[in-house]
Image: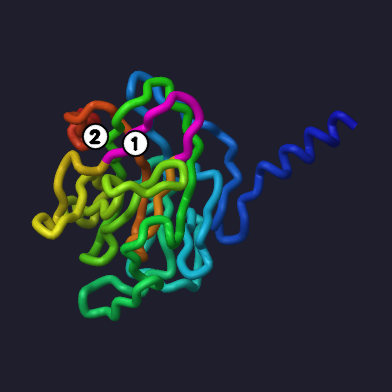
């Protein structure tokens, strides 16, 4: 009986569904000294995914869904990443259909969720490592505990095209390529929280994300230092 209960428990938790569209990871990622980094594919649930959905892309992933480019799993961390599919708008010439291939409403479409534990409450700057090939696959929203503050809206990538590139900028009317130090979450209490990312543009590809209390931290400098050795 004990072995049967253990088997059932494992079976329930291991719920990777067809086409790797959802994950039942129960891991809680713990902040340490104001820093936390997470693999994007380690989300524990996905919501609002009837129109667009995050898919885990690895070397074995195959789909008939429309996608603008080939897999970048070989050069992704852990050889996996997640992407919002189908991708029907890659350039300005493609039709923009609100609440289908684009949304300015954070939390309304394709939301992935991660469990975290915060030891040191405060302001955390959000960085995401993304792969962008065009002008319409480089936007994302981030939220906390089901809320979507202004400081988490419209994450934007302009640099690092056709490569995995860390960014933490917010698109504004004045700065279409994004304002630095404007993407952050104020986590006011220690303990369990949930970070969510939701679609702004379909075709968005995410490899890793991190939070840091250090406003001056830049993971691109760290990545360059590592790859240069």
- Residue at 47 percent of width and 39 percent of height: 194
Query: Residue 30's spot in the image, x, y percent?
Result: 46, 26
> Badge 1 local density, few (<14 within 10 Å), some, or many (20+)?
many
Q: Which residues are magenta?
A: 184-194
**For the residues bearing labels 1 and 2, Cβ distance under 8 angstroms:** yes
Residue 112, magenta (yes or no)? no
Mark identifier at residue 219: 2
Label whose residue precedes the other's in the sequence (1 or 2): 1
For label 2, count other residues whose C-alpha is less than 10 Å away and answer few (under 14), some (14-19) or many (20+): some
* Residue that carries the numbered disc 1 in the rendered image: 210
Q: Nearer the viewer, residue 23 or 62?
A: 23
* Image quarter of the N terminus: top right
Q: Position of residue 222 (x, y in %)?
A: 22, 30
Give the number of the disc on residue 54.
Answer: none
Distance of label 1 from label 2 (alpha carbons): 9 Å
Residue 180, quarter of the rendered image: top left
Helix, strand or loop at mark 1: strand
Its colouring scheme is rainbow
Residue 228 makes an appearance in the image = no
Seen in the picture, residue 227 relative to 94 is either above or below; the reply is above
| Residue found 41% across the figure and 25% down from its top | 31
Residue at far left of view: 174
Quarter of the image holding residue 102?
Answer: bottom left
Q: Depth check: 59 or 211 in front?
A: 211
Q: Residue at x 14, y 55 (%)?
A: 177
Which element carries disc 2, helix, strand or loop? Answer: helix
Question: Where 41 falls versus 55 (above or below)?
Answer: above
């Amino acid at each position: 009986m004990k072995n049967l209960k253990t088997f059932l428990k494992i079976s329930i938790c291991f719920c990777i569904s067809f086409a790797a569209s959802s994950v039942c990871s129960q891991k809680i990622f713990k902040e340490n000294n104001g820093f936390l980094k997470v693999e994007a594919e380690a989300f524990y649930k996905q919501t609002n995914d009837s129109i667009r959905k995050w898919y885990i892309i690895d070397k074995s992933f195959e789909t008939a869904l429309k996608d603008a480019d080939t897999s970048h799993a070989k050069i992704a961390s852990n050889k996996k990443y997640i992407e919002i599919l189908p991708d029907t708008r890659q350039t300005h010439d493609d039709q923009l259909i609100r609440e289908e291939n684009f949304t300015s409403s954070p939390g309304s479409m394709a939301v992935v969720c991660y469990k975290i534990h915060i030891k040191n409450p405060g302001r955390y700057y959000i960085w995401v490592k993304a792969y962008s090939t065009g002008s319409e696959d480089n936007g994302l929203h981030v939220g906390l505990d089901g809320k979507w503050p202004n400081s988490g809206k419209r994450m934007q990538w302009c640099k690092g095209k056709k490569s995995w590139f860390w960014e933490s900028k917010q698109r504004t009317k004045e700065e279409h390529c994004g304002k630095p130090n404007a993407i952050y979450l104020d986590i006011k209490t220690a303990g369990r929280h949930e970070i969510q990312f939701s679609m702004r543009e379909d075709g968005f590809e995410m490899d890793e994300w991190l939070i840091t209390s250090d406003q001056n931290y830049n993971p691109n400098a760290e990545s360059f230092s590592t790859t240069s050795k």
